[in-house]
Image (cartoon, rainbow, N blue to C red):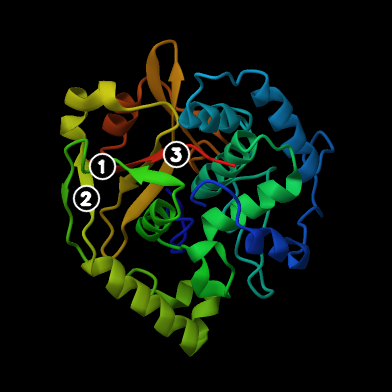
Amino acid sequence: MIPSLNRRMFLARGALALPLLAALPALERCRSSQDRAGEDDEEIFQRAVRSVRAGVGPSTTPGEVVAAVGRQFLGAPYVAHLLEEPADERLVVNLRQFDCLLLVESSLAIARTLLLGSSSYDVFRAQLMFIRYRGGVIREYPSRLHYFTDWVADNVHKGVLEDVTRALGGGRRTTPIRFMSTHTESYRQLSNPGYLEEIRSAEERLSSMERYVLPVRLLEEVSERLRSGDVIGTVSSVEGLDIAHSGLLTADGGMLRFLHAPLSQGKVEVAPGSFIDYLERHSVSDIVVARPLAVHP
C-alpha cells in the first residue's frame, strides 16, 4: 500500500480510431529520463515488443500476451506519483518506473499494440491514452480514470476488458465512493472548483452504478476459471475508496501468481507463492477481476 492519500497511488473496441491517431502529434513525448541501462522509454518499448513477440502464437490469448509483457518489467523500481505533474494534463509515458496501475496500463497497452500486429511506439502511446482516459480522450485532469471502478467500467465500454467478477460469483457492493472529494488536500488539481465538481459527479455516478466484488473465500471454487493476464483489483477497507492495489495474474509452472508493483518491495515482482497465498498473507477479503479482450484491426 502507498503512504499517500493519492487515489491512484493508494492503490477501442478492437482497432484504433482515426481521431485517436490524429490526436497523437499534439501529445508531448516523455523521453527525458533513462533507466540504469541508459535506455529511454521508446527503446524499452521496442525491447519488450521483440521479446514478447517471439512467444506469441495463434493460440496465445490476449491475457497471456499482457502477462508476458508485464514480466518484462520485473525488477523495475516502484515510484509513486508518476502521473502527477505540475503542468496541464498530458499523456505521461514511463516504462522505467511504475506504480501498481501504471504497470497494468503499460502492459495492456503494449500487448494491444502487439495484437494489432504493430511495433509502433506511437500506436502504443495511442493505446495508452485510450486505456487511461474516459472515452480515450484527454480533456484535462477529470478525464483521467482515477478510480479503478471507473477505469474498469470505461474500458469495458471501450471493448478493452470484460469484467468477469460477477460471472465468477461476485456479489453486489454498495459502499459509497468519495475518497478524492473528501481528501482534496491530497490533490493539487482539485483546488480548481470545476475539476472538483466533475470528480464529485463521477463519484456519485460510480456510487450508484451496479458493481460487484468477488469474496476471496470463494476463490478455491473458481480458481480454474481464472486466467493468466487477468487484471486484479484488491478491494479497499478505507472509507470512500474502492480499490487499494492492482496487478496481473501470471501463470508460472501451472500456478497462477500475482505480478504487481508494490511499495513494500520497492520494485515490480511476482509475489511468492500462489495468488491465493498472496491474498491470504495480506488479509484481502474481496477482489475485482477484469479480463483483456481480443484486438481486431
- Residue extending farthest to the right is 38
The x, y position of residue 275, in whole percent, is 35, 27
Give the quarter of the image for residue 271.
Answer: top left
CA gap, disc 1 to disc 3? 15 Å
Question: The C terminus is located in which quarter?
Answer: top right
Could you say whether the residue bearing mark 3 is in a helix, strand or loop?
loop
Which of the pair 22/193 is nearer the observer?
22
Left or right of residue 202: residue 125: right
Which of the pair 279/226 is nearer the observer?
226
Amino acid type at circle 2 is Tyr
The x, y position of residue 128, in whole percent, is 60, 52
The residue tagged 1 is 165
| 10 Å crowding of disc 3: few (<14), some (14-19), many (20+) | some
Disc assigned to residue 293: 3
Q: Which one is earlier in the sequence, the residue at label 1 or at label 3?
A: 1
Give the quarter of the image for residue 109.
Answer: top right
The residue tagged 2 is 212
Residue 94 appears in the figure: no
Q: Residue at x 28, y 58 (%)?
A: 238
| 10 Å crowding of disc 2: few (<14), some (14-19), many (20+) | many
Disc assigned to residue 27: none
Q: Which one is earlier in the sequence, the residue at label 2 or at label 1?
A: 1
Amino acid type at circle 1 is Thr
Amino acid type at circle 3 is Leu
The x, y position of residue 180, in whole percent, is 39, 71
Could you say whether the residue bearing mark 2 is in a helix, strand or loop?
strand
Mark 2 touching mark 1, by CB under 8 A? yes
Could you say whether the residue bearing mark 1 is in a helix, strand or loop?
loop
CA gap, disc 2 to disc 1? 6 Å
